[in-house]
Amino acid sequence: MQMNTLARKTPNTKHIQVGRGGKRGKTAGRGTKGQNARGNTRKRPELRDIIKKIPKRRGYGKNRAKSAYAKPEVYAVNLKVLESVFDNGATVSPVTLLEKGVLKSNRLPKAGVKVLATGELTKKLHVSGCTISASAKAKIEAAGGSVE
């Protein structure tokens, strides 16, 4: 074995030299003109352009759709529902509405329940702990019920 006969196990891999003559002259295999034909460039990320277009303002975050002046949630219950669910002489309150399954949630909203006048009422009901529209109050009292 002679020193001049030794060869590397893995030969050096030369990087392609662009634009140095040889078989790839002129555009050197890069096509023609434009951002990709230039040296030391890379394409601008599209996501960055999208982010830059979003307005940069205070308050525009994960709660962007919520208003600062939003009214608290109110469950609306119509008289026709009370007519079908409650018996004559029953007491209507947010708790009894939950027990009967009229309200779907286990948590009552901060603003509570409002009774509206849609439908007719023939039963005598005692309504307490709910806000009531003027026309609903008139119909409840006309049927012989009471409002607290």
Image: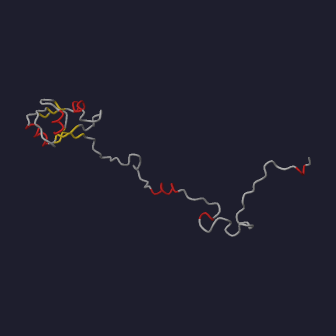
Image point 62% across, 60% down: which residue? 41
Q: In the orientation shown, which residue stands out farthest toward the bottom?
A: 26
Q: Is residue 29 left or right of residue 124?
A: right
Residue at position x 41%, y 48% in the image:
61
The quarter holding residue 19 reads bottom right
In the rendered view, tell whether residue 117 sits above or below residue 43: above
The quadrant the C terminus occupies is: top left
Residue 75, given in percent of the width and then of the height, sits at 24, 39
Colour style of the rendered protein structure: secondary structure
| Image x and y of residue 50, in percent | 48, 56
Determine the residue positioned at 61% across, 68% down: 33
Q: Nearer the viewer, residue 98 or 64?
A: 98
Write down the quadrant of residue 76 in the picture: top left
Count of residue discs: 0
The x, y position of residue 26, in whole percent, is 69, 70
Residue 1 coordinates in the image, percent (x, y):
91, 46
The furthest residue to the right: 2
Vertical position of residue 124 compared to residue 62: above or below: above
Relative placement, left or right, of 91 versus 110 is left
Q: Residue at x 36, y 48 (%)?
A: 65
Q: Which corner quadrant of the image does residue 82 belong to? A: top left
